[in-house]
Amino acid sequence: MNVKIQLLKEMINESKKIVFFGGAGVSTESGIKDFRSADGIYMMDYKYPPESVLSHSFYVQHTAEFYDFYREYLCFPDAKPNMAHFKLAELEQSGKLKAVITQNVDGLHQLAGSKTVYELHGSALRNYCVKCGKSHDFDFVYKSNGIPKCECGGTVKPDVVLYEESLNDEVVSGAIKAIKKADMLIVAGTSLTVYPAAGFIRYFKGKNLVLINKDATAMDENFGLVIHGKVGEVLREAV
Ligand code: OAD
């Protein structure tokens, strides 16, 4: 076994309050594209800069086009959890892992069995009518055409945090509390470029701070252990 993975394994063995903080790279092994890799969503040629489509102002100004993009690139009806999701659920069940904090909206951690999941950017599985507040499921939005409309006539909006929108206070405080209490923080599959999420890492005061990421990030030097690799493959070996 690779020396770094062996070290990760030892850290996991000695830790009692592990928190995992992940991003889009956690789901690429489930066939979901991330945003900023060479083949990521933000790198593709699209009629609008893809990053701008996921903003509140674009949603307001070009609502129908937002939904076209959203259904095509942010909805994954057939995606299944991968080894990263399953190993984290296993670690939680064994009592070692206290929380998963994710920037993903695909619900795959819960599908793998994780219970304490802080979804910083919301979930595509929850959708609400902006007029009457009625909740609608994933299929309601995914299978509708154009702008999804509630029976009351209001637009049904995914519970996904767009640029210019704020994060849910309860989710943020739960995530920060978990990080503050952790003795090990595993950060994985994230470019650590989107705030406030990326800044939460500074609340960690525990011993073992680990980064597992395919590519280098601007924050690599802040971590005690950096493994450049695929998170599913790394966790398969280490857990
Ligand atoms: P990014 O696309 O910015 O970064 C994903 C990172 O994961 C990259 O650094 C990849 O190198 C790495 N990666 C890809 N596959 C991997 C794998 N199998 N194992 C390990 N690492 C892998 O995604 P995020 O950091 O999650 O917001 O982006 C943050 C936010 O930006 C997203 O939540 C999204 C986006 O705008 C919203 O949609 C609200």
Image (tube, rainbow, N blue to C red):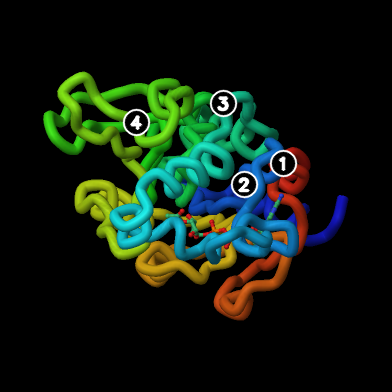
> Which image quadrant is residue 213 in?
bottom right
Q: Is mark 2 within 8 Å of ligand 1?
A: yes
Q: List the residue tagged with mark 4.
A: 148
Give the answer, above or below, for where 23 lies relative to 57: above
Q: Is mark 4 within 8 Å of ligand 1?
A: no
Task: Give the mark nearest the N terminus, 2 or 3.
Answer: 2
Task: Looking at the picture, tell me which residue is in the foreground, 91 or 59.
Answer: 59
How far, Cα to Cα, is label 4 from label 2?
29 Å
Q: Amino acid at mark 2?
A: Val
Q: Amino acid at mark 3?
A: Pro
How far, Cα to Cα, is label 1 from label 4?
30 Å
How far, Cα to Cα, is label 3 from label 4?
17 Å
Q: List the residue tagged with mark 1.
A: 29
**Of helix, strand and loop, which one carries label 3?**
loop
How far, Cα to Cα, is label 1 from label 2?
7 Å
Task: Give the residue drawn at x 14%, y 35%.
Answer: 131
Q: List the residue tagged with mark 2.
A: 26
Q: Nearer the viewer, mark 2 or mark 3?
A: 3
